[in-house]
Image: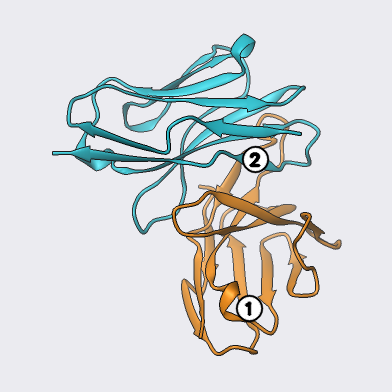
Chain colours: A orange, B cyan
Amino acid sequence: GAVVSQHPSRVICKSGTSVKIECRSLDFQATTMFWYRQFPKQSLMLMATSNEGSKATYEQGVEKDKFLINHASLTLSTLTVTSAHPEDSSFYICSARQSGAQSYNEQFFGPGTRLTVL
Amino acid sequence: AQSVSQHNHHVILSEAASLELGCNYSYGGTVNLFWYVQYPGQHLQLLLKYFSGDPLVKGIKGFEAEFIKSKFSFNLRKPSVQWSDTAEYFCAVGGWNQGGKLIFGQGTELSVKP
C-alpha cells in the first residue's frame, strides 16, 4: 500500500512553454502533498506544501506564479512549471502524507519527473 | 532554525564492512525521524522510521538506527554491507508543529566495492 505515482516520468520541452506534472496517491487519500526539487548529487529541497481544497504554501524563494500547484482532489496534485527556462531543468519529486497521528509526518514519495528545458 | 546534518558526503566501503552514517538534527520539540534510500535512477524508499518507543529501530534490508535524544542524533547502521547497498542515503526530520513538512539532510553517497 501507500503508492504514489507521477506522470510523466520524463519531459523535454522548449524554453517558454509550460509543463504540467501530476502526482497521484493510488491507494490512499492524501490531504497533503509536497513538491520537492532535487538537483544532481544534492538533497531534496521542499518547494511547496499542497493541501486539498486550499492554496498551496510555498517555501521562501519559490515563485508561486512560476510553479502553479493545484490540489483538486484527495488523490491528485499537479505542478505546472510556467514559461519554463533551462534553469528550471531538474528532478521534481512529489510526496503524499497519510493522515493519522501515528503517521503524522510519514510521507510516501513518487518516482520523480525529470524535466529538461531546451 | 531547524536543520539536519549528515556528516559524511561520500563513504566508500568494501563488501562485508560495517556501516555507520551520522545524522544530527536541530529542533526544539518532538520529532519523527526517517532514513530514506535512493538507489541510482530510482525514487526514494523508506528504510526505517522512529516515532516513539524503543530508540533502536530496525528497518528493511538489515539496516537499523538509534535515536539518542541527548545527542540529537539518529545514526544509521548496518553490520555488513553489500554491493547492492550502493545508493544515496538521506536522513529526514519532521516536527509535530511543522504541518507535516520534512527537513532533509544533505545526503550521503555510499559506494560499496565488490
Residue B66's disc is none
Q: Camera-side residue: B15 or B55? A: B15
* Residue at 51% over, 59% down: A39
Given the current orientation, which residue lies at the most extreme right position?
Answer: A54
- Residue drawn at the location 60% of the way across and 65% of the way down: A23
Q: Residues within 10 Å of mark 1 (few under 14, many from 20)?
A: some
Q: In terms of depth relative to the viewer, which is nearer, A66 or A55?
A: A66
Subunit that carries the residue with mark 1: A
> Percent position (x, y) of residue B75?
47, 22
Picture quadrant where residue A25 is located: bottom right
Q: Amino acid at mark 2?
A: Ile
Mark 2 lies on residue: B103
Which residue is depicted at the point 66% across and 41% down?
Answer: B102
Q: Relative to A17, does residue A100 appear above or below in the rendering?
A: above
- B31 or A84, nearer to the observer: A84
Callout 2: 10 Å neighbours few (<14), some, many (20+)? many
Total marks placed: 2
In the rendered structure, the answer to whether residue A61 lies left or right of residue B32 reads right
Residue B50, by quadrant, is top right
Quickly name the residue at label 1: A20
Residue in the image at 61% along x and 81% along y: A85
Helix, strand or loop at label 2? It is strand
Chain where mark 2 sits = B
In the rendered view, would you say A66 is above or below A51? below
Q: What is the x, y in percent for residue B6?
A: 51, 32
The amino acid type of the residue labelled 1 equals: Lys
- Asked where in the image residue B11 lies, by quadrant, the reply is top left
Q: Secondary structure at mark 1?
A: strand
**Vertical comparison of A61 with A16: above or below:** above
Q: Is residue A48 left or right of residue B55?
A: right
